[in-house]
Image (cartoon, rainbow, N blue to C red):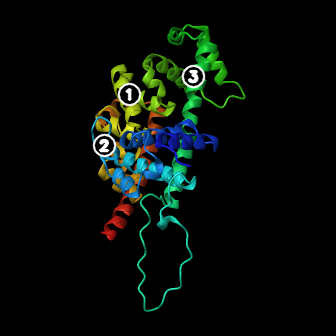
Amino acid sequence: MQKTLEEAIGLYLTYLEKKGDKPNSIRPFKRALNRLVDCFGSGKIVSEVTDTEIQAYLTSDFIMKTKKGNPAAKETIGRDRRLIKRAVVYFGEQGWREVPAKSRKTRKAPASKKTSIVKASPSPTVPSDMDRVLDDAAAYINEQFNRVADSMMAIGRYLLKTFFDDDPDKVKDKSSRKSVSLRQLSQHPDMTMSFSALRRAVDLAIHERTCFTDSTLNQLSSSHKILLLRIENQDPRLIKKYGKQAVKEGLSVRKLEELLIKDGHLLPRGAGAIDGEQRKLIKFGLSKIVSPLDDFLETNLDTFDEKSSDSDDTSKEAVEITIDKMIKAKAKLDEYIGHLKNRL
């Protein structure tokens, strides 16, 4: 049975929903396939789209550039190519287009010893099993990760409504009876969240209400929102700008974070925040030794003298303990210096 491209895509998205894919997982498929329609037209018969045309599409501006004409991120290009290939395979499985001969499983004939065998490259329209595993793993992990963010947002909204009468001003009121109740909640024997975690959840709910009023920004996942709230001073102008860009270009949380760091609106975390010298120390297990030494070398002796000027017994005892530890540390440092010099 012949299907137009628009019909086939609609049935494929319905199939993804029925097999249990979440909206956040389906959204990239929809975005990528809509651009396929932009290229070929909604009325194009699926069986008339050739492998050559699909291969050309995968290297065209529809894939390589954003709708604004800017170069697309490498991650986005790779993802969209895989999604298109998976959809094309599904179209073939439904009989809407011919399955390429290369993708059909055939029994290999025994090879003659004198015959050199050249392995045929896989059809460009068929993703490898590893691609599918990676796509499914990424979708599943992102879904679980976003559930955590959704939970924090939901907890914050609940607390704001239950303990502060849905009034952000009451959260700021230090004399409010409600803030005491929030602390009492954190001390409940069955409560696993700390007071500070509960308070952060409430702050997220307040910022969500004040910073994400634009209807476009409501399409962002909770993970995207929490990331945008890391922008210094929660600047509404920047949140709106980058939030809309994330929605329009389908940026993942990771790509959005990289963009914000590149533009100077976020400080890097983890390994990205560590300079080259520190990274080398960590690699060779020396960071735990050098970091305390850096702190020690920055110690101001004048400040130390001011704090230890008292002549009572407690002060003298503290100084004696410090001197004893320094003598032991000096001996240990000499041992390390000798050991490290031998490794040079």
Residue 66 relative to residue 49: left or right = left
Identify the residue at image location x=30%, y=43%: 65
Q: Amino acid at mark 2?
A: Lys
- Residue where numbered disc 2 is placed: 65
- Whether label 2 touches label 3, CB < 8 Å: no
Look at 61% across and 11% down and name the residue there: 178
Q: CA distance from mark 2 to mark 3?
A: 38 Å
Where's residue 135, x and y in %? 51, 51
In 3D space, how far apart are the residues under numbered discs 3 and 1 (Cα atoms)? 24 Å
Q: Secondary structure at mark 3?
A: helix
Picture coordinates of residue 155 (x, y %)? 60, 25
Label 1: which residue? 244
Q: Nearer the viewer's eye, disc 2 or disc 3?
A: 2
The vertical placement of 9 against 102, above or below, is above
- Alpha-carbon neighbours of circle 1 within 10 Å: few (<14), some, or many (≥20)? some
Look at mark 3 in the image and give the residue it sits on. 156
